[in-house]
Image (spheres, rainbow, N blue to C red):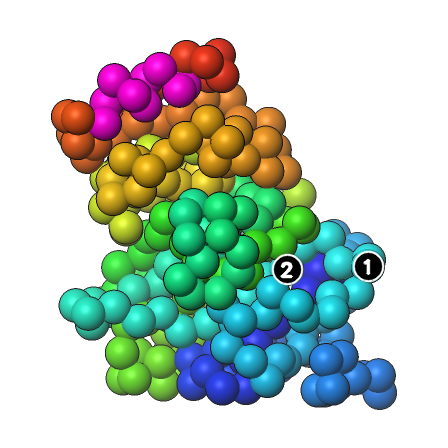
Amino acid sequence: MILIIASKVDIASLNIAKCLINTHDFEKISEPLFGNPLYLKKLENGETLRLSFTNQEPVDTQALPLPSQVKLVIFVSRHKSESGTPTLSVHVPGNLGEASLGGLPRKISVSPASAMKEALKAMKEAQEEMMLEYEVSYECTHHGPSLDIPTMFVELGSSPKQWRSKSAAEAVARGALAAALNRRLYRTVIGVGGPHYNMKFTRMALETDTAFGHIIPKYAVSELDEEILRQCVNRSVEPVEKAILDWKGIKGDDKEKLLNLLSKMNLKIEKI
């Protein structure tokens, strides 16, 4: 089972869920989930896709009682940034350091890199088709929950104007559906360095067969240690082939330590 989770306290999340239900043939079924209505869609690949709601913020769902048969969780949610830049984004949840926004400290969720790549591609296609003035990008691994099953966020940002946009919500809905439909396993890497929204990694994913799983931003590299790096490699649906380094987006003081950590893990590197 693949499960899309929307939040009843999130304007953008409800907007995206409404698009899924009204435009993409989800049918309400009798059994509830999390005390809320449950919707069902049969996918072309034979998968059963369910859509349900939580009464919590998505980042605060660490203890949500997920059904045991769920093999991929896709959260649809709002994204907020100080810049207010209109954004369609995708990322893995979890905390590389302390748990300042939900989840568990120093624990990251399992990364579904190929599914995230399909979401990224679908949102980019929708953005171009509908001529949306939005950026489409990966975000780094951040915020809760920290789950032991493949988990991803597809987000609509970054201010109330965008959260209420029907066309932007439709773009994110398409991203969530593309992730659920994915059957292909791409060449998977982790990304290290650069800003919170790494456009170098985004372009690489859109233009090549590379899929990014966990992404460690520049501001987190100084706190990186072997345990967290191993989580980034091991907590992935697909085998991680190498680490892609945004070399100019890594502080000089952090580079030697990072290379030593990667060497200990015998992980190939590529600098871009």
Nearest the viewer among 66 and 206 is 66
Magenta highlight: main SS: helix
* Vertical arrangement, residue 21 with respect to residue 237, above or below: below
The boundaries of the magenta stretch are 254-262
Q: Residue at x 41, y 12 (%)?
A: 263
At label 1, the amino acid type is Ser
Residue found at x 46% / y 13%: 264
Quadrant containing the N terminus is bottom right
User: Front-most of 202 and 264?
Assistant: 264
Label 2 crowd (10 A; few <14 / some 14-19 / many >=20) = many
Question: What secondary structure is found at the residue carrying circle 1?
Answer: loop
Left or right: 238 with respect to 263? right
Asked whether 162 or 268 is in front, the reply is 268
The reply to whether residue 195 is visible in this rendering is yes
- Tag shown at residue 68: 1
Residue 260, relative to residue 63: is it above or below?
A: above
Which of the two labelled residues, at mark 1 and mark 2, occupies the earlier sequence position? 1
Q: Is residue 173 magenta?
A: no
Q: Is residue 13 depicted above or below 92 in this figure? A: below
- Who's the residue at 49% across and 65% down the image? 102
The label number, if any, that marks residue 73 in the structure image = 2
